[in-house]
Amino acid sequence: MLKGHQSWIFNSKPIILGSAAVGGPFEGNGALASDFDIIHEDLWVGQDSFEKAEKVMLEHACARAIEKSNIKKEDINFFISGDLMNQITSSSFAARSLGMPYLGIFGACSSSMEGLALAAQLIDSKSAKYVMASASSHNATAEKQYRYPTEYGGQRPPTAQWTVTGAGAAVLCGEGVGPRVTSATMGRVIDMGISDPYNMGAAMAPAAVDTIEAHFRDLNIDDSYYDLIATGDLGKVGHEIAISLLKDHGIEMMPNIFTDCGLLIYKKDQPVFSGGSGCGCSATVTYGHFLNRMRKGELKRILIVATGALMSPISYQQKESIPCIAHAVSIEM
């Protein structure tokens, strides 16, 4: 049901029956290592290219989410997935292996919550019984595509972020036990003229703020409704900008409530510059860490605001600025 201008209320409150997070070796040494279902010690995941490695990680996340849901692969009506690769090939090639009806999406790093919102809408409208939403990224594939191959060893500025090598997946259904998806706010494209691909946090922060404001306005609530509000991929620089912009707009977030997945996933002594990013950032932190905390009773209401920079190698080469978007999904026990 439409609520306000750009939000959905899911009356049936679709259930996240099972979820899984898969990480790479760097993530396995991070702050949330214990929340990953699978950690690969090899960045190549036994493949002959990083692109194939990302696809395999996504397949592993999907397989584990289905296993934890106690259903069969054949029960899934629709598979929704997105990634950062050109033409979302990681998702499409994983869909080829999985053999499920497939909806490929591209919201850059916001793909995790875009997929979760669409999955909830399919369940709530009774257009499906089981839907799986997923997203993935790989540090080496993203760096090679959008900046420089890691082998190049180029110097990175302090504003740069570290693309998470990881994949997350969740299975939604109408009946069962688990965290429930209660609402979603779909974001607008916001472009503040930033063109530096090493400053994604600053580019995406205004989009996160715009969606958070829209969510509060459409649902007539404020930040006190949630135990935790997490942006997806702003990192240190973007998180500080978002706090400042929200304050300017009359919304002063409590530090113990407002956080960012890119700030949580790595340890302070890991050389990640401004923090984590990538489709796999919000996907693994949400489908692993946050949902685990909800199942333990530590959190009852959370809002995940995944942010994405809708650029491409071509748009960057043509000196375009970076259009950004954020999608918010609320999950409650």
Image: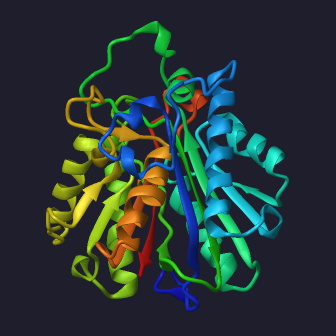
Q: Residue at x 74, y 79 (%)?
A: 129
Total marks placed: 0
Q: Nearer the viewer, residue 139 or 198?
A: 139
- Say which of 89 and 196 sits in front: 89
- 126 to the left or right of 156: right
Tell me: residue 306, above or below residue 181.
Answer: above
Q: Is residue 128 above or below residue 244?
A: below
Q: How is the image coloured?
A: rainbow
Q: At 38% from the left edge and 48% from the top edge, which residue is drawn? A: 34
Location of residue 145 in the rendering, given as x and y in whole percent from the top left corner: 57, 25
**Quadrant for the C terminus in the image:** bottom left
Residue 319 seen in the figure: yes
Horizontal side of residue 101 vs 301, given as left or right: right
Residue 232: % across, % down: 39, 53
125 to the left or right of 18: right
Quadrant in the rendering for residue 92: top right
293 or 253, nearer to the observer: 293
Q: Residue at x 40, y 30 (%)?
A: 26
Most foreground residue, 55 or 28: 28
- The residue located at (45%, 37%) in the rendering is 164
Whole-percent x, y for residue 326 in the image: 44, 58
Name the residue furthest top.
152
- Which residue sits furthest bottom? 11
Q: Quadrant of the N terminus?
A: bottom right
Instruction: Residue 205: give x, y in percent of width and height.
Output: 32, 51
Residue 211 visible at all: no
Asked if residue 177 lies left or right of residue 154, the reply is right
